Image (cartoon, rainbow, N blue to C red):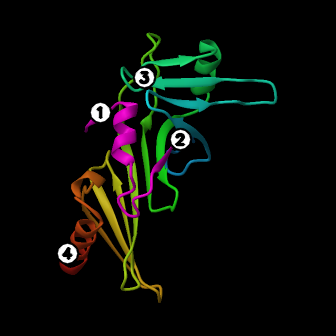
Amino acid sequence: MRRLTVKDFIEYSAPCLICGKPSSIGLGFDAEYNAPLISIKGSVGTNFTYFDLKYGYTTDLKLYIFHRDNKFLTNDKRRLEEYLNARKSYLRAYCSSGCSQFATQSLSLHSSGQVALVSMRWERLIVPVGDGNNYYLTSYFGENKSVLDSRNLVGETQTLEIPLLPRDSFRDRAHLIDKLRTYLLYG
């Protein structure tokens, strides 16, 4: 499984393959990794990604992750460690139109000031197509598989488990739709 820096993850997820809009980056926190219970939106700059982990009315906690070397900086290292150790955190990206979502394995910060490389956990692409169908492609990297759901306007659903088809397998939206239709036709 490919290991990614924070910058690599940002580039992997943006722009959205379906609608072309930029992706938002965030930190997700949950117990199961499947659906975020809490997400903190990040700000992506030219040289770094910034998260304001403010919790409480007077507590200010900031996290900067630099793109050049994947190092992090915070205003309070001890509180940051406590904050992240109390939660399972991961990087997530999502399209503003809801067409795509991405999540990594758990995020780990080394005491040397470096963010550990991450692997993809899952990604979901939601593809509306002109014939009234919607295709939902969810890829699970740890299980090396994808699940393709096709749903039409009258509620009929077709579900297939297929080999792993990550986002970077497709040149563009049209290539993605052609590939999914082929799987549905011959699956």
Report which residue position mark 4 lands on.
182
Q: Quadrant of residue 173?
A: bottom left
Is 179 left, or right, of 84 in this rendering? left
Q: Amino acid at mark 4?
A: Thr
Mark closest to the chain's N terminus, 4 or 1: 1
Mark closest to the chain's N terminus, 1 or 2: 1
Q: Is residue 24 magenta?
A: yes
Q: Amino acid at mark 1?
A: Arg
Query: In the drawing, what numbered circle is on residue 3?
Result: 1
Q: CA distance from mark 1 to mark 2?
A: 18 Å
Mark closest to the chain's N terminus, 4 or 2: 2
Question: Considering the numbered disc 3 on the image, is that residue within a helix, a strand or a loop?
Answer: loop
- Please state the horizontal and vertical placement of residue 132, each as a whole percent of the image: 41, 85
- Please state the horizontal and vertical placement of residue 70, each as a whole percent of the image: 39, 23
Highlighted magenta segment, given as a residue range: 1-26
Q: Amino acid at mark 2?
A: Gly
Q: Amino acid at mark 3?
A: Val
Q: Is residue 178 magenta?
A: no
Q: CA distance from mark 4 to mark 3?
A: 40 Å
- Please state the horizontal and vertical placement of residue 26, each as a whole percent of the image: 53, 41
Report which residue position mark 2 lands on.
26
Q: Residue at x 29, y 33 (%)?
A: 3
Is 45 left, or right, of 63 in this rendering? left
Q: Crowdedness of circle 1 by 10 Å Cα count: few (<14), some, many (20+)? A: few
Q: Residue at x 28, y 71 (%)?
A: 177
Is 129 left, or right, of 177 in this rendering? right
Report which residue position mark 3 lands on.
115
Q: Nearer the viewer, residue 187 or 71?
A: 71
Mark closest to the chain's N terminus, 3 or 1: 1
